[in-house]
Amino acid sequence: MVLDRFDTLLAGMGRAKTTRRLYVGIARAWLAAGGLPGGIDQAFLTRRLAARRRRVGQSTLNLEFKALRAFYRCMALAGIAASGTERALPRGKRAPQRLPRWFTDDQIDALLALPDTSTFVGLRDYTLIGLLYETGLRASEMMALQVTDLLPDGAVYVARGKGGHSRFVPIGVDMMRLLDAYLVARAAQRPGNRNALWIRINGVPLRDGRSAWEIVNRYARRALGCAAGYDRVRHAAKRRPWSGRYPHMLRASFATTLLQHGCPLPGIAQMLGHVNLDSTARYLGTDIAQLRAAIAMHPRNIKTSDH
């Protein structure tokens, strides 16, 4: 099957599992709509592009065509399509920049006040949400953590980050103590997998990043009073329980908090796992007032009185 071949070739190129899943999903939708693995029919491409523009924004279109370019390059490597087939696809247009949303301190407090830490599930969820906020890890990275990734010197080792990049993220003393308490409760559940950090009450590991989304979304909807709105979003998204932006908002909150307290941009980028500063710079817009104050300190902007 061409999609299996596509996934295999992407893996051989070192693409992350989440990227492969996304690209294969886009290719599957393209083929289901009438696209052909051996070439691109211009009439079909025009109809498909017009239909997608009515439903999605430019950022989504850019991503879809990026995935399809990769698809046809792989089809060329597999001998199914001619070399250069992907050139028939339009290039991405510049999309309006959307700044990440983030939680206020009061919202974080409301979110963390909900889990019942007297139960194993409540303690697990409280620890997971707190660790997401304190480390800025992606949901998939959080779910991939092993017990041995919690280092005794007060850091979390992310061995399976996006793009295969590894990094260390420091954590505070209070979080270390909270993790120790969670590990004690975890051991009492007789986990079937001794290495997986996050488990269910029956000892089975939580599956993947979707589990983190489900957990955070559940508490965020209650804390922020937006359950009804979420239900409409979930229906529109074909009832996928991991719909919603709340886990990523914790990541953006982490970056914003660091920025507000004077952490240099390269340090934030390293902890977020960004390869370049351009990705991290998107978080700067969340605290534009601080940046304006900082730029005012530049010698060219300091106004001196006349003598």
Image (tube, rainbow, N blue to C red):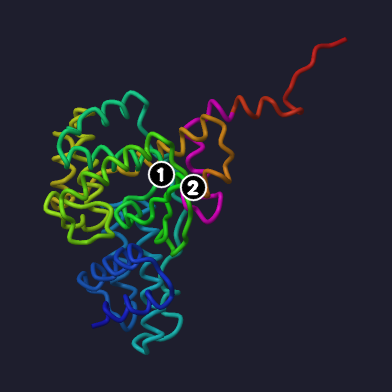
Viewer-proximal residue among 46 and 163: 163
Disc number placed over residue 136 in the picture, else none: 1
The answer to whether one can see residue 6 in this image is: yes
The disc, 1 or 2, on the residue closer to the chain's N-terminal end is: 1
Q: Are discs 1 and 2 less than 8 Å apart at CB?
A: yes
Magenta-drawn segment: 272-291
- In three-dimensional space, the C-alpha distance between marks 1 and 2, rounded to whole angstroms, equals 7 Å
Q: What's the residue type where badge 1 is placed?
A: Gly
The vertical placement of 106 against 157, above or below, is above
**Residue at the spot 27% in from the left edge and 81% down from the top edge:** 2
Q: Find numbered disc 1 in the image and state the secondary structure of the residue it sits on.
A: loop
Magenta-drawn stretch contains 279: yes
| Residue 248 x, y percent position in the rendering | 34, 44
Seen in the picture, residue 291 relative to 14 is either above or below; the reply is: above
Asked if residue 191 is among those painted magenta in the image, a careful observer would answer no
Instruction: Identify the residue shown where x is 56% and y is 36%.
Output: 263
Q: Nearer the viewer, residue 291 or 66?
A: 291
Q: Relative to residue 296, is residue 171 drawn left or right?
A: left
- Per the image, the residue denoted by label 2 is 271
Height in image: 101 above or below 169?
above
Residue 246 visible in the shown view: no
> x%, y% of residue 122?
18, 38
Characterize the magenta stretch by its predominant secondary structure: helix
- Residue 39, given in percent of the width and then of the height, sits at 34, 81
Q: Is residue 273 left or right of residue 174?
A: right
